[in-house]
Amino acid sequence: MDRRDFVKIGAAIGGALVASEALAQGAPEKNAGKRARRPGPFPGGQPAVVTPNGATLKLVEKDGVKIGHLVAMPVKHTFTPGLEAECWGYNGRVHGPTIEVVEGDRVRFYVTNRLPEPTTVHWHGVILPCGMDGVAGLTQKPIEPKDTHVYEFTFSKAGTFMYHPHYDEMTQMALGMVGMIVVHPKNPRGPRVDRDFALVTHEWAIRAGARRPDPNEMKDFNVLTFNAKAYPGTEPLVVGKGERVRIRLGNLSAMDHHPIHIHGLAFETTWTDGGEIPVTARHPDTTVLVPTGSVRVIEFVPTESGDWAMHCHMTHHIMNQMGHGFPVMVGANAAAIDKRVQALVPDYMTMGQAGMGGMDDMKMPVPKNSIPMRGGKGPFSTIDMGGMFTILKVRDDPDAEDGKGWYAHPKGTVADKADSTKMKADGIDPDVTF
C-alpha cells in the first residue's frame, strides 16, 4: 500500500492509526496534525534529512543516473572547542556527507583516494552486485593512492544504511571514515514525519595532547561523538511540539554499543538497516540500543516543550578524555597527600574526594588540546556532561528557533530549593535519621 492508497482508505482508518500510534507514545491526539505540515521534496512529501553538524552529498543527474563524488582524504577536525585532531574523512569533513536518494535510483559514485594508503568504500547494508560491495581483495582491487574508482548500482531497497572503507578498516574507520545513507521509499507508508535527522555514533581514542586518534586502541575510548562532534560542539535537534519526528541512528564505533536515551518522551523503533519493523511488533521505549555496525530508526511525537537531554546512557560515554586508571578517591581525606606532593608540584590537588561533578567550574589547567571532564554552559549551571550528548529542543514555533536559545520555563515549573515552612507543613524533616 503506498501513501496515496493509505490516504484513500479514509480518515476513519487513517485517523485511528495515527491516534493509536500517538497514544502509544503518550501523545494526545489533539497535538497530532495541529501544525500545518509542509510537504518535503521526496515521495509522499517526506522531508529532506538533516544531518546535524554534517552535510548531504551533492548529486548530479545525467541520463537517468545520479552521480556523486567522494574524496577520501586527511582532514583537520574540531570535535568541540579545545580539541582538534588530524583525522581522515571524505570531501573535507569528518564524517563523510550523508548520501540521500530514492528507492530505485541508479547511482554512480566516483571515489578518489588522497590517503597515503589504499582504500575502498563498502555500502553497508545495501543490496547490490557483489563486485560493488567494496571489500578489498574479495570483491575488488584496492583503490591505490591518487587513483579514482567508480561504483555503479541501483538502490533497490528503501532504508537507512551506512558507508565505510573495507581496506585497513581498523585504521580508516578509527580516524573517521564513515557516513550515512538514506534511501527514501518510492511509495512511503504510514504517517508522514515532519522532521528527519541522521546521527552516526562513533568512539575515538585521543590521548590528552595527542594530535591523532589512536587506531590501535581496543577498549579505552575517551572521546564519544554524534556526527563526529562531542558536546558542547553538537548541534541541537530543533523540533515542534506535536510534530512527528524521525531520528536515524547509525553506529560505526569500533567496539561499543550505545544505548541512546531521550528525556521527556517515548518513541518506537520503526526500522533497522534490515528493513521496516511491522507496526504490530513495535513497542514504546525511552532508550534504544544501537549495536556497533547497525542502524536503528526511531519515531516519536513530543508533547512537552523544553530542552531535553539526548545521550548515550553508558556514563563514561558522556565524559571527555577521562583517565580511567585512578583509584577510588570518593570519601578519602587527601590533605596529607596534597601537602606532601605540593612540595614537589606546587599546584597539585587531589581530585574526586567529593565526587567528580563541577570539575569544569574549577578551571583547572589541562593539557593543551584536550577537554577532560569539560561540558558546556547551561541556563542554570554548567552541564557537566560532554561526549555523546546533545539536546532535543521542542518548541511551539521551531522554525523561529536557531537552536542557540534556552527554553523559557513557565513560572512554577522548575524544581528549586524547598521552602522550610512548606516542608514542615508536609511533614518533611531534612534531618531525619535511618
Image (spheres, rainbow, N blue to C red):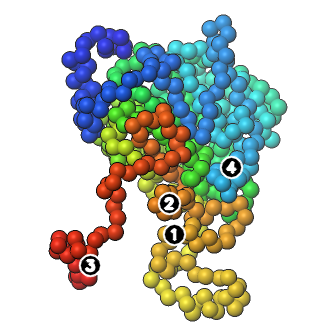
> Marks 1/4: CA distance?
24 Å
**Front-lying residue, 44 or 332:** 44
Left or right, 411 with respect to 110, comes to left
Residue at 54%, 39% (x, y): give it: 402
Q: Earlier in the sequence, mark 4 or mark 3?
A: 4
Q: Considering only vertical position in the picture, is 112 above or below 216?
A: above
Left or right, 337 with respect to 192, comes to right
Residue matched to label 1: 358
Residue 265 pos. (x, y %): 33, 44
Residue 241 pos. (x, y %): 37, 37
> Marks 1/3: CA distance?
24 Å
Q: Earlier in the sequence, mark 1 or mark 4?
A: 4
- Label 1 CA crowd tier, 10 Å (few <14, some 14–19, many 20+): some
Q: Earlier in the sequence, mark 4 or mark 2?
A: 4
Q: Earlier in the sequence, mark 2 or mark 1?
A: 1
Residue matched to label 2: 383
Residue 320 pos. (x, y %): 58, 60
Q: Considering only vertical position in the picture, is 143 above or below 361?
A: above
Q: Amino acid at mark 4?
A: Thr
Of all residues shown, which one is farthest toward the top? 63
Residue matched to label 3: 430
> Marks 2/1: CA distance?
9 Å
Can residue 8 be seen at all in this image of the molecule?
Answer: yes
Left or right, 220 with respect to 433, comes to right
Residue at 29%, 10% (x, y): give it: 8
Q: Amino acid at mark 1?
A: Gly
Residue 78 numbered mark, or none:
4
